[in-house]
Amino acid sequence: MGIGAITSSSTYAPQASAPARSGTRTQSAQQEYSAEDQAKIDKLKARDLQVRQHEQAHLAVAGGLATSGATYTYQRGPNGVNYAVGGEVNIDTSPGSTPEETISKARQIQAAALAPADPSGQDRSVASSAAQMAQKAQAEISEKQRQVALSYGQSEKQATIDIFA
């Protein structure tokens, strides 16, 4: 069983976490942070949302091929909150039991890998591998059809059916 990970890598360069601010905090009280800290918090919040949406897009399309839920890597912000800055969804990238099943599965893998609005390099790599898997399965089908046609004395042109049509 092959497992491929479709991921979202961080475009926000993680830095060492700032030490937790001293003093008492209440959830209802609004903390005041330096302009620099507030900018970091805002960037981390935006990245967290982007990463979570990205991974949810993969999950929504992967369906039964997902072998896990989304997993995230986190960075602690100056406010002490952990924000997702990267993530991945593992999917089953093994071939199907038949060439036809492999083609169907490869199409779903490609769709899951390219589901986010901004596929990562790893996402594109998984989609490319799935396309190669589908091409190999199509070649198997074509070869089987050619063999059947030859065994019945038909010409190769008459027996070839393109599944992608």
Image (tube, rainbow, N blue to C red):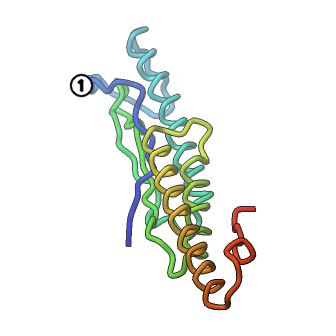
From this view, report whether residue 128 is shown above or below residue 149.
above
* Residue 113 appears in the figure: yes
Q: Within 10 Å of the Cα at label 1, are there few (<14), some (14-19), or many (20+) other Cα atoms? A: few
From this view, report whether residue 25 is shown above or below residue 65.
above
What residue sits right under mark 1 in the picture?
A: 16
Q: Secondary structure at mark 1?
A: loop
Image quarter (top left, top right, bottom left or bottom right) of the C terminus: bottom right
Residue type for callout 1: Ala
Q: Farthest top residue?
A: 35
Left or right of 78 on screen, residue 65? right
Q: Image point 50% across, 81% down: which residue? A: 97
* Residue 68 in picture, x, y percent from top left: 44, 64
Quarter location, residue 94: bottom left
Callout count? 1
* Residue 20 in picture, x, y percent from top left: 27, 27
Q: Image point 61% across, 48% down: which residue? A: 115
Image quarter (top left, top right, bottom left or bottom right) of the N terminus: bottom left
* Residue 33 in picture, x, y percent from top left: 40, 15
* Foreground of the two, 100 or 14: 100
Q: Image point 52% across, 28% down: which residue? A: 46
* Residue 112 in picture, x, y percent from top left: 57, 54
Q: Farthest bottom residue?
A: 152
* Foreground of the two, 42 or 162: 162
* Residue 22 appears in the figure: no
Left or right of 98 on screen, residue 26? left
Q: Image point 51% across, 57% down: which residue? A: 130
Left or right of 114 on screen, residue 87? left
* Foreground of the two, 37 or 149: 149
* Foreground of the two, 156 or 45: 156
